[in-house]
Amino acid sequence: MNLKLLKDTLSIPQTRTYCVLDGAAVKDLPKRLFEMKPPNYCLLRGELTPDMVHVAPYVALMIPNDEFSNWVIENCFAGNKGIFVQTRFSIKEMRKHFRALVTVYDELGNPMLFRFYDPRVFRKFLPTCDADQVKTFFGNVDRFLLADEEEKDFLTYTQTDGVLDQKTIDLSDKE
């Protein structure tokens, strides 16, 4: 995999890049966030039990070439550990948006966790959405990026007026 191309894809001028990582899939994620100190928020509300802290989803700011961002790129692209998001909006605005997405309700009104940040869920869910659902899901997000099923290339998702556009960015090392 071409790590330079991956880093370049995640670094766009005038755009903030965030990762939304799954604590259940990323070993010691809260510890990494504490040690490396990127701007970050847990997407679950309220006081969490210690075991929930370790499996919760987190949104974190990716700063080009800093320790945390390099660690994420090298360790969290594969293994269905999370997704990347590009936007012009602040981490607090993204936390609010993602918190609204993480809880869905069944037919009886019971809350359930929606693991949209798991690439396996994301790849299956988003293409099934109608135009209004696409707009709601995107909110202020310009582009979602995640590993393809083989975890060799990037899939990118954008939308215009609710019409979803998916592209593939080849991350292979070509000589």
Image (cartoon, helix red, strand yellow):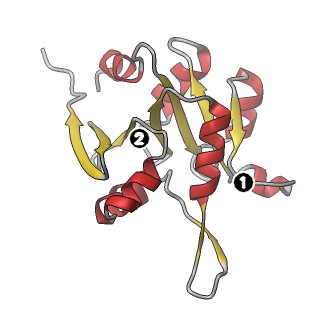
Q: Secondary structure at mark 1?
A: loop
Precedes in sequence: disc 1 or disc 2: 1
Q: Amino acid at mark 1?
A: Leu
Mark 2, residue position: 78
User: Which residue is most to the bottom?
Assistant: 108
| Towards the viewer: 89 or 114 | 89
Is 47 left or right of 113, judged from the image as shown? right
Check residue 169 in the rendering and tell me which mark sits there, or answer none.
none
Residues at discs 1 and 2 in contact (Cβ within 8 Å): no
Label 1 crowd (10 A; few <14 / some 14-19 / many >=20): some
Tag shown at residue 44: 1
Q: Is residue 43 above or below residue 170?
A: below
Q: Name the image quarter holding the N terminus.
A: top left
- In the image, 43 versus 146, the foreground residue is 43
The quadrant holding residue 31 is top right
Name the spot of residue 174 as percent of width and height, x first: 14, 19
Q: Is residue 105 left or right of residue 168?
A: right
Q: Residue at x 23, y 45 (%)?
A: 165
Residue 6 horizontal/vertical position (percent): 35, 23
Q: Residue furthest front?
A: 161
State the image quarter where residue 12 is shown. top left
Q: Percent position (x, y) of residue 73?
A: 46, 27
Question: Residue at 63% of width from left, 37% of height from top?
Answer: 93
Q: CA distance from mark 1 to mark 2?
A: 23 Å
The relative height of residue 157 versus residue 35 in the rendered view (above or below) is below
